[in-house]
Amino acid sequence: MLRAQGRAVHQCDSGWVPVFVDQEQSISLMSVGFLLESPDEAVVWRGPKKNALIKQFVSDVAWGQLDYLVVDTPPGTSDEHMAAVEALRPYGPLGALVVTTPQAVSVGDVRRELTFCRKTGLQVVGIVENMSGFVCPHCTECTNVFSRGGGAELARLTGVPFLGSVPLDPELTRSLEEGRDFIRDFPQSPAFPALSSIAQKVLSEAPARLS
């Protein structure tokens, strides 16, 4: 998505140097994929080794001065999630941004994620509903492929802010696969205002949480 595949991680006095994905060096990235010899190699590690690497990614990477550190995790409430929360806790994390799709199976999984956040003392910034309908590029009619409203209803029942819904968009998928700048290249996409609104809500929430 960021055209960083095959890039190398180097060492400096402060630890690992993250991979910068733009010429201005405004976005840096760290992934276990950079440490593997082949992109087809599987990470077959037991919990303690994975947890140790997560802690290293937080404390042993020369991140420098950051505006935001975004940790992207798969769904779940595993040891790895616990390790990420504990590694970030000394730095006062802003909170978790939880993403679901509208159907009941996904909403059920995310409900457990919210319970995990409460038990670990991690604030929830809000819920985002992804794949929320498909807007036809020809007639602009919206078809709810994966049901509808599951994210908003979960937010209402749990008292968590609902940040918005992002519709399915082939242009968004293509831009991610090609590593393109979606915001710049597809301003007329139906996903553009949704993503912009969600980002603005998260950014406006940050000063209140940090104060």
Image (spheres, rainbow, N blue to C red):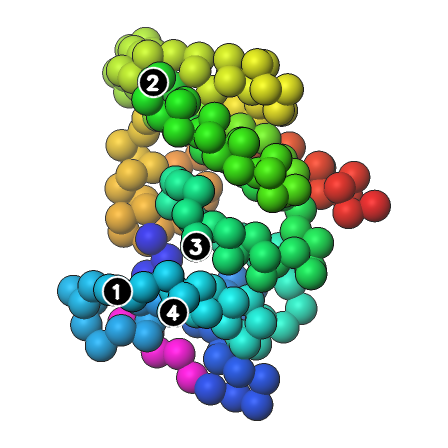
Outermost bottom residue: 13
The residue drawn where x is 67% and y is 68% is: 65
Please, what secondary structure does the residue beneath circle 2 have? Answer: loop
Residue under label 4: 49
Please, what secondary structure does the residue beneath circle 1 have? Answer: loop
Task: Inspect the image, locate mark 3, and give the three-letter code of the amino acid beneath it.
Answer: Glu
Residue 80, numbered circle: 3
Viewer-side residue, 85 vs 203: 85
Residue 6 position (above or below residue 98): below
Which mark's residue is nearer the viewer, 1 or 2?
A: 1
Identify the magenta region: 6-10
Q: Quadrant of the C terminus?
A: top right
Residue 43, numbered circle: 1
Outermost right residue: 211
Residue under label 2: 103
Percent coordinates x, y for residue 158 in the rendering:
59, 19
Rounded to the nearest angstrom, the CA distance separating label 1 from label 4 is 10 Å
